[in-house]
Every structure is written in C-alpha cells, then in structure tokens.
Image (cartoon, rainbow, N blue to C red):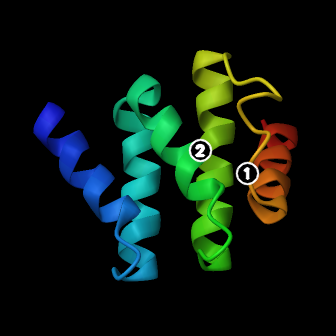
Amino acid sequence: MTDDFFELALVAMDKSGGVSERCDAISRMAELDPVKAKEILIGVASSWDEPGEILSQAGKSLGLLAAKAGYLSEWDLRDVTESAYEAYNEWLTLE
C-alpha cells in the first residue's frame, strides 16, 4: 500500500504529466491514505501555476479529507488558491 501511495504522489506532483492522470492520482491518493495525502494536496492546491482542473480536483479531495478525517483548519488552507478553495467549499456543501 505504501508503494501505491508513493507512486500516486509522484504522478500527482508531476507538473509535466497529463491532467487526467494527475486528477485520478489526486483522487485515489486522498482515498488511500488521507493523513499522508493532506500535505501533498495542500501543496498542489497552493500552486498558482497548476491548471484549473488540477486545482479543482485538489480542492475536492481536500474536502473529502475534511469529511473523512475532520482535521483541516483554516490555517491548513491559508495558502490554497481561490479556485481550489471554492472547490473545497462546494464539495463540503454537497455532502
């Protein structure tokens, strides 16, 4: 399981990778290990040069983490981009 998570994390953070592959990796990572995924997803969601789809998926996955683990604070989200934060909030209102 650790190797799966590590490989997903590499795909998620690889800015030269395809958007759909990265979005899939971000989603799977959050489900596989929410605790480990937290910092990686915050890093991706805070990167202003990411495509909108990546930021949106990172925000949704952070919402999933908040729902599952319940430990994300405003401090955790202080540096995320506006679009990632909007996706995070939209996801929370759907739950």
Answer yes or no: do the residues labelled 2 and 1 have beta carbons within 8 Å? yes
Q: Position of 67 compared to 10: left or right? A: right
User: In which quarter of the view is residue 66 placed?
Assistant: top right
Q: What SS does tag 2 mark? A: helix
Please provide percent x and percent y for residue 15. Answer: 41, 75
The quadrant of the rendering that contains the N terminus is top left
The reply to whether residue 59 is in sight is: yes
Query: Residue at 85% of width from left, 45% of height from top?
Result: 89
Q: Position of 35 compared to 70: left or right? A: left
Q: Note whether 76 is above or below 9 in the view shown.
A: above
Q: Note whether 20 is above or below 91 in the view shown.
A: below
Please provide percent x and percent y for residue 2. Answer: 16, 32
Query: Residue at 74% of width from left, 58% of height from top?
Result: 84
> Which residue is under mark 2?
42
Q: Note whether 69 is above or below 95 in the view shown.
A: above
Q: Position of 89 compared to 18: left or right? A: right
User: In which quarter of the view is residue 75 placed?
Assistant: top right
* Label whose residue precedes the other's in the sequence (2 or 1): 2
Query: Residue at 24% of width from left, 41% of height from top?
Result: 5
